[in-house]
């Protein structure tokens, strides 16, 4: 194989970036107790809006902002129906995912298969000249850098700040949170919106970055479902969710290479690997107390241990 | 009266939003609606195409009525359709040359329904044994099913010579279901769909089980107090939904495509979820909503050619209808 490992690592970081961004957004949303199932459609809509706006204004900055705004709007609709009017979150999220997908194809039709602006790669001076890490870490577009910065930021916000504590309380025990005088509904709405914004931006990261352009299919299809799986697999912890995104991106990158060397492994199996892992994580959540697994297995499974926010997806009315 | 008002509000809001979306892309809504009409009602051929979509939608939606009655979100229905098609294709590959066509078709039918039911029961078992929400197990299993279909098409079942997205080798002509001249669907399949609809209605109207699952769905605690096994009913409802989804897959493989293709489910599983949601989980509106959805689906196909619009418009309208219904119903419940 004649390929620089630095370049390979850089590719993984770049292709995981949108999953990291959307994954952190969804983690925060779910930590506040709301499940935004519309992710797959939101990302695709963000991809379309991001590309179309960049094309029309010739500014990728405007495109990314517009993509974020489209994600915000979708999340706000979910918030209105589910938080204000108590519609089931899963039902609304599911409909929104299909609707946004079709809406993206429909409204994006005039922008299909044309060349448009892309996010430019910014090489960090000096650092990018370092032999291995330079090509891997310091040769990306601005949003990929931001995706890396976002991981510790989200972690710190969630576990080290007061507002992070309140956010977790809203998802764990909304009644107690309310009793302490916090506006549970408002907190949930804020993080739902933030998660929607990040999902929209993630869409633009596809259409302006790793899968440039718009079309049917765009190439970002199914990524939202992957993100939802990664959030569970990552145990609602931004660092672990991001780690999951990098593992998934590595699997994808490897599947291209592995296929050339070893024809036995079909690429499709690596592509869907997150889903059985997601189911396994969920099974473990509920069987972790019972210890009938053999020792070595237990140690491996402990890595997957997780607990969802107690009030995730449940309606909460503030009256 | 309340229901009529809800319907009128939904139709009004949906029409306005759809027209808004059309004006954004600079198309006259009247042109679009006449194109929909022409694409579905202008000829017997077009209408036959609508029926060809209506049949799988109704069969699949009927299965979902059972799971929804219990409050189960059988999102895995998409994968269950695929497994039905895989079962069908497996029988066709291995038995078509050995037995007579009628027997092969019969065995394939049973195999399709069985695999669909097993795939659905898997979600059910994960729910009652490990408390995994059926949405996540179902979604996961959908992707596994899709991978299985792709792997079969590009691996063991690939066409002699070259594997391609166009699917496996077609089934032997002997096991293609006879279709009357100028028709696009088999009248036998239409009768079968009506039968499924009728049996479903009968179960809900006048069997104990039908009443029971609705009682359990409305209040699972009360049911438990009365000694009704919720878990058993979860599994049974999932199995029934999977059985009918498998039948849908059989229809797609035997009647529509005559082979296994990557998009064998045509997204009818997800579409059926929308049908039943729009029906507010009641069986009476299902055949009519399925007809409307089939018309939107078929009417959209010509849009790229006639009006240079993307064919996803049908999906947009379907989505707006269901979203508006959810909004209106819950808005009124809350005010």
Image (cartoon, coloured by chain):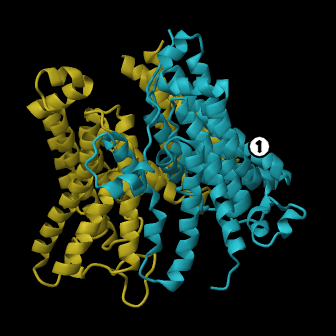
B227 w.r.t. B251: above or below: above
- Considering every residue shown, the one lying at the far right of the view is A125
Q: Quadrant of the N terminus of chain B?
A: top left
Picture quadrant of residue A159: top right
Q: Colour of chain B?
A: yellow
Residue B94, x across and y down, in percent: 19, 80
Residue A80: tell me if it is visible: yes
Residue B22: tell me if it is visible: no
- Considering every residue shown, the one lying at the far bottom of the view is B161
| Identity of the residue drawn at 24% across and 67% down | B87
Nearer to the camera, B292 or B332 = B332
Q: Is residue A201 left or right of residue B130?
A: right
Residue B250, x across and y down, in percent: 25, 63
Nearer to the camera, A87 or B38 = A87
Subunit ID for the residue under disc 1:
A
Picture quadrant of residue B211: top left
| Identity of the residue drawn at 57% across and 20% down | A185
| Identity of the residue drawn at 33% across and 80% down | B157
Q: Colour of chain A?
A: cyan
Mark 1, residues whose alpha carbon is within 10 Å: few (<14), some, or many (≥20)? Answer: many
Nearer to the camera, B200 or B208 = B208
């Amino acid at each position: 194989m004649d390929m620089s490992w630095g370049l390979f690592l850089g590719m993984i970081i770049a292709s995981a970036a949108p999953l990291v961004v959307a994954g952190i957004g969804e983690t925060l949303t779910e930590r506040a107790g709301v499940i935004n199932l519309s992710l797959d459609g939101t990302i695709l809509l963000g991809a379309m809006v991001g590309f179309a706006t960049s094309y029309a204004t010739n500014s990728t900055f405007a495109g990314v902002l517009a993509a974020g705004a489209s994600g915000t709007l979708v999340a706000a609709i979910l918030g209105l129906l589910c938080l204000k009017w108590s519609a089931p979150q899963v039902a609304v999220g599911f409909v929104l995912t299909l609707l946004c997908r079709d809406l993206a194809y429909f409204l994006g039709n005039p922008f299909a298969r044309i060349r448009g602006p892309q996010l430019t790669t910014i090489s960090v001076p000096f650092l990018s000249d370092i032999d291995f890490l330079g090509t891997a870490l310091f040769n990306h577009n601005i949003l990929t850098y931001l995706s890396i910065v976002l991981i510790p930021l989200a972690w710190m916000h969630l576990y080290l700040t007061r507002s992070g504590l309140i956010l977790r309380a809203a998802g764990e025990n909304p009644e107690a949170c309310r009793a302490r005088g916090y506006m549970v509904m408002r907190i949930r709405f804020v993080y739902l919106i933030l998660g929607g914004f990040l999902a929209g931006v993630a869409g633009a990261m596809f259409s302006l970055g790793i899968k440039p352009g718009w079309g049917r299919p765009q190439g970002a299809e199914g990524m939202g479902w992957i993100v939802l799986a990664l959030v569970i697999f990552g145990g609602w912890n931004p660092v672990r969710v991001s780690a999951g995104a990098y593992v998934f991106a590595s699997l994808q990158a490897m599947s291209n290479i592995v296929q050339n060397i070893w024809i036995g492994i079909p690429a499709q199996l690596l592509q869907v690997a997150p889903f059985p892992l997601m189911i396994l994580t969920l099974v473990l959540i509920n069987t972790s107390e019972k210890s009938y697994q053999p020792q070595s297995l237990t140690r491996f499974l402990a890595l997957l241990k997780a607990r969802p926010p107690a009030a995730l997806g449940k309606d909460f009315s503030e009256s | 009266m309340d229901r009529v008002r809800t319907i009128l509000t939904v139709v009004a809001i949906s029409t306005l939003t759809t027209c808004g979306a059309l004006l954004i892309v600079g198309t006259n809504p009247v042109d679009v609606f006449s194109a929909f009409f022409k694409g579905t009602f202008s000829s017997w051929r077009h209408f036959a195409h609508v029926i060809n979509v209506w049949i799988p939608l109704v069969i699949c939606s009927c299965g979902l009525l059972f799971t929804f009655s219990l409050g189960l979100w059988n999102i895995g229905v998409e994968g269950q359709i695929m497994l039905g098609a895989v079962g069908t294709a497996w029988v066709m590959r291995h038995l078509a040359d050995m037995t007579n066509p009628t027997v092969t078709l019969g065995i394939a039918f049973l195999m399709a329904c069985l695999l669909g039911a097993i795939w659905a029961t898997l979600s059910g078992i994960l729910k009652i044994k490990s408390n995994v929400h059926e949405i996540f197990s179902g979604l996961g299993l959908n992707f596994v099913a899709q991978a299985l279909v792709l792997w079969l098409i590009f691996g063991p079942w690939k066409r002699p010579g070259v594997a391609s997205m166009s699917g496996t080798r077609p089934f032997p002509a002997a096991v293609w279901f006879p279709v009357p001249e100028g028709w696009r669907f088999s009248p036998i399949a239409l009768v079968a769909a009506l039968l499924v609809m009728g049996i479903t209605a009968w179960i809900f109207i006048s069997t104990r089980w039908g009443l029971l699952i609705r009682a359990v769905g409305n209040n699972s605690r009360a049911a438990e107090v009365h000694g009704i096994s919720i878990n058993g009913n979860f599994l049974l409802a999932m199995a029934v939904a999977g059985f009918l989804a498998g039948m849908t897959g059989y229809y797609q493989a035997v009647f529509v495509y005559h082979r296994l293709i990557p998009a064998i489910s045509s997204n009818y599983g997800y579409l059926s979820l929308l049908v039943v949601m729009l029906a507010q989980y009641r069986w009476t509106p299902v055949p009519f909503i399925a007809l409307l959805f089939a018309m939107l689906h078929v009417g959209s196909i010509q849009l790229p050619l006639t009006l240079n619009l993307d064919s996803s418009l049908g999906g947009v309208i379907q989505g707006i209808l269901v979203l508006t219904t959810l909004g209106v119903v819950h808005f009124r419940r809350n005010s």
